[in-house]
């Protein structure tokens, strides 16, 4: 799994490959840093992610719970249908501070809009 | 009793024989009553367990079936292939091999992804809670069953409904989401959890159930989220 942090108009955590128990710790750390560095919100670009399991979802959820205290939001870029399915089944897509987009530009824009 | 009675007679202690016999008869009666009570308690327990199993099955639209090791092994049959898992790094390989096997069997591509995710969750639980386990793949008519067995602490029965059924995010520790995902994605999940560990059987048809059982009438498909 590759993680890169990009600072564009918004902070972007880009993950590629698979997130599972073996590497979820790196994902968790990246999310925690983002919560501290970008309390208004950030993008998680999962467009190159082929697999994420409940461990990965749990990390997103933990970060979300901390972020929501400062009114922050998480914008997800999701393309893979299996990844979408798992976000739907775990109900992450229903959380008020989490949004799903199919490209990075719209995800970034959504954060810019909401912080106004 | 007989030896005791014989002893009384030989020692010419006849006056004490009658009370001794009476006492023995009373004690035998007590023992019989106790055995009857224990049998009744066992029957009641079995009855409650059966009620519990049927409730879980009904509440999940038949997708989660509480079973025991023997039942799962009987349904699964002999394995096509078996793997030992001992750390989280093993999981990616298991997922890939499961995917390739399912593809070889001709499973619908969409279903393969769901099977792999269900297996991933079961394997994650085994690694997290037991640090090791065994994964075996079994061929069923028109379907595949992947069995994940571990020698971990098992799941306390009282936690099961919360783990398997509660909507939203459960506080039942870290077990919560994995089972919800398995139940939602697989066709059926068999779960046996005992003192010596946990066995999960993930059943997935090659094609969606309507195609698997043509002419079976209207099937009630309940998706539990």
Image (cartoon, coloured by chain):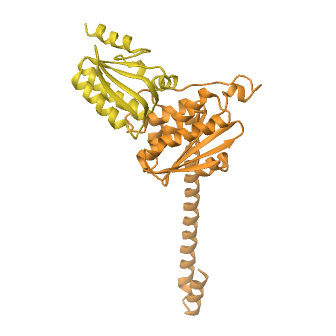
Chain colours: A yellow, B orange
Q: How many marks?
A: 0
A49 in relation to B119, above or below:
above
Q: Quadrant of residue A115?
A: top left
**Can the viewer see residue A90?**
no
Q: Quadrant of residue B62?
A: top right
Q: At 47% across and 19% down in the image, what residue appears? A: A79
Residue sitting nearer the eye, B153 or B98: B98
Estimate the x, y position of residue B76 in percent, counting from the top left.
Answer: 65, 46
B182 in relation to B23, above or below:
above
Estimate the x, y position of residue A99 in percent, counting from the top left.
Answer: 38, 16
Which residue of the protein is positioned furthest toward the right in this rendering? B215
Estimate the x, y position of residue A105 in percent, counting from the top left.
Answer: 37, 11
The N terminus of chain B sits in image quarter: bottom right
**Can the viewer see residue B114?**
yes
B26 on left or right of A52: right
Q: At 51% across and 42% down in the image, what residue appears? A: B93
B81 on left or right of B87: right
B185 in relation to A105, above or below:
below
Which residue of the protein is positioned furthest toward the bottom in this rendering? B11
Residue sitting nearer the eye, B95 or A72: B95
Estimate the x, y position of residue A97 in percent, counting from the top left.
Answer: 34, 17
Q: At 32% across and 29% down in the image, what residue appears? A: A62
Residue sitting nearer the eye, B206 or B24: B206
Residue sitting nearer the eye, A65 or B38: A65
């Amino acid at each position: 799994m590759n993680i890169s942090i990009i600072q564009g108009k918004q902070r972007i955590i880009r993950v590629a490959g698979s997130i599972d128990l073996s590497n979820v710790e790196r994902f968790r750390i990246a999310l925690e840093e983002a919560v501290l560095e970008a309390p208004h919100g950030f993008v998680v670009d999962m467009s190159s992610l082929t697999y994420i399991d409940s461990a990965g979802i749990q990390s997103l959820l933990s970060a979300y719970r901390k972020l929501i205290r400062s009114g922050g939001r998480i914008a997800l870029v999701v393309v893979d249908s299996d990844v979408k399915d798992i976000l739907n089944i775990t109900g992450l897509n229903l959380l008020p501070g989490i949004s799903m987009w199919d490209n990075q530009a719209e995800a970034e824009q959504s954060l810019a809009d909401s912080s106004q | 009793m007989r030896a005791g009675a014989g002893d009384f007679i030989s020692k010419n202690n006849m006056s004490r024989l009658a009370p001794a016999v009476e006492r023995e008869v009373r004690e035998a009666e007590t023992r019989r009553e106790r055995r009857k009570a224990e049998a009744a308690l066992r029957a009641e327990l079995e009855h409650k367990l059966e009620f519990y199993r049927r409730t879980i099955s009904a509440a999940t639209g038949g997708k989660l079936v509480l079973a025991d090791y023997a039942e799962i092994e009987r349904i699964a049959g002999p394995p096509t292939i078996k793997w030992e898992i001992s750390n989280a790094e093993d999981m990616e390989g298991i997922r890939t091999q499961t995917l390739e096997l399912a593809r070889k069997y001709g499973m619908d591509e969409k279903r393969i992804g769901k099977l792999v995710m269900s297996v991933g969750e079961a394997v994650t639980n085994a690694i997290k809670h037991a640090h090791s386990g065994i994964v075996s793949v079994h061929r069923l008519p028109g379907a595949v069953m992947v069995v994940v067995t571990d020698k971990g602490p098992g799941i306390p029965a009282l936690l099961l409904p919360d783990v398997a059924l509660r909507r939203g995010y459960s506080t039942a520790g870290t077990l919560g989401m994995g089972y919800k995902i398995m139940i939602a994605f697989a066709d059926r999940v068999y779960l046996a959890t005992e003192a010596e560990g946990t066995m999960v059987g993930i059943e997935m048809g090659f094609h969606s159930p309507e195609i698997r059982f043509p002419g079976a009438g209207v099937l009630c498909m309940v998706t539990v989220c």
